[in-house]
Every structure is written in structure tokens, then in C-alpha cells.
Image (cartoon, rainbow, N blue to C red):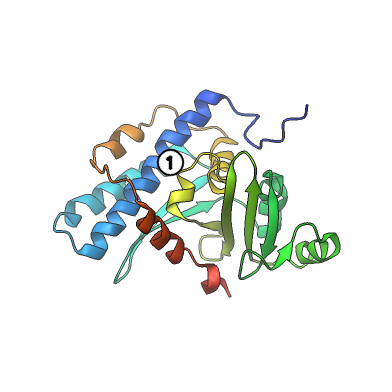
Amino acid sequence: MVNNDILSEFSSSDINNFKKDFTQMIKVGAEIDRYYGEAQHDLDTLIPKFEKLAEQFNRKYKGIKIKTKKTIEHFKVSVFIKVKDVKEFFAETASKIPGLKSVGRANFNQIDASDIDKFARFLDSLLDKICISYIDPETGTSTIAAVFNRSERMIEIIYNPVEMMNENSAGFKICAFYALKNGFDKKIEIHGGASTFGFSNILDEIEKREWYDKFNPRFLE
């Protein structure tokens, strides 16, 4: 049987190493954003510490980049992958994730993958953004959006933190692929440093729905 997992070329230990580092970074970033919205007093300590850890993460994994930005209401943790354009991104990884259901420019359900003609025309017209949904009997449903960021000259992954922390999601697999494809520096420790933030919150169902509401790709229009 052909293994169609895009991570099949990597060792389980390398994937697990990335999983521990990456999911912890996403989790801590989401929790700092929560604190940011509540104007917690210890942000002056937490944010510089996380920013320093993000720099170490970026040195460890050359194919992926975490970048932070403070806005009026949010502490945004952006994830970039080093791909030259959206077409390459889709062809190299996103199209190879099992359960591809539909694609679109501004929403996840614009064109069904089963409509071969419309799907092919859509792919031919791809420019700088795409929204993709997946449904798989073994791994469930997931969504991912990607946009070419001209200032960074990389693809930005527009993600939902809850999904991104799931190793079976399309977003996690895509990020792991680019993080591991050119090797990484095993000497740099990330997970231990991220664990020292002490966040133990597990999003409940209401909070999960709030995250999904925030993850709305309409701004890509």
C-alpha cells in the first residue's frame, strides 16, 4: 500500500520533537493572547520571554517562522512557511492531505473537490490566497487558509489554535513538513522553555467555538 502521508519521509522521533515544540508554542501564544485581552499584569514578563523563545524556534526550524505582533486587542502569533507561492504550497503539501473536500478564495466551501472541471480551473487561477477544508473518516474535519505575505515573502498560514495543536490536522502536518524537510538543529531546546510559562488551561467547548469564530478568513477577500 502506498503511504500518502506527507510526513512519511521523516522519522517518528523527529516528528514528535517538532510536535512537542510547535504545539507548546501555539498553546502559549494563545494563552498570552488571552491574557493580553484581559490586560493581565505580568505581560511585561511573558511577552519578551515568548518573543525570545520564538527567535530560538526560528533558528531551530529553518523552513518555518513564528512571528509575533501586538495590536490594540490581541497578541498575534503568526506562522509562516518558506514557500515561494500558493500554487507551490498547494501542489507540494495541501493537495496531498487525505480527505480534501473543498477550496475557495474567501471561504472554505466555494468549490467542491469532486467537481473536477471547476476544481481544475480554480487551481489554474490561484494567485495569492486559498482556503481549504478536509474531511477524513479517521482524522475528522479540519480547515486551513494560506496567503502569500509580500512583506515576508513567505506563505502565512491562517490557523485555528485548537486545530493546529492536533497532530492529525492538515495545518499541523503542513507545518511539520516544512519544518523538517531541510533538517533542524536538535541542540536547541524549545519545549522545556515553553513549558516554564505554566499555562495549564484546556479550552472548553465554549472557548473552542470562540476560537472558531475568530478564525474567519473573510478578511482574505
Residue 190 placed where, x, y %? 35, 35
Q: Quadrant of the N terminus?
A: top right
How many numbered marks have been drawn onto this rendered protein structure? 1
Residue 180 relative to residue 20: left or right: right
Crowd rating for badge 1 (residues with CA inside 10 Å; few <14, some 14–19, many 20+): many
Look at 51% across and 27% down and name the residue there: 14
Look at 60% across and 36% down and name the residue there: 181
Residue closest to the eye, 85 or 18: 18
Q: Which quarter of the figure has residue 24?
A: top left
Residue 157 relative to residue 108: left or right: left
Residue lying farthest to the right in this orientation: 117
| Residue receiving disc 1 | 22
Q: Is residue 122 above or below residue 95?
A: below
Residue 170 placed where, x, y %? 59, 47
Residue lying farthest to the left in this orientation: 41
Residue closest to the eye, 40 or 126: 40
**Which structural element holds mark 1?**
helix
Residue 21 placed where, x, y %? 40, 37
Look at 43% across and 52% down and name the residue there: 161
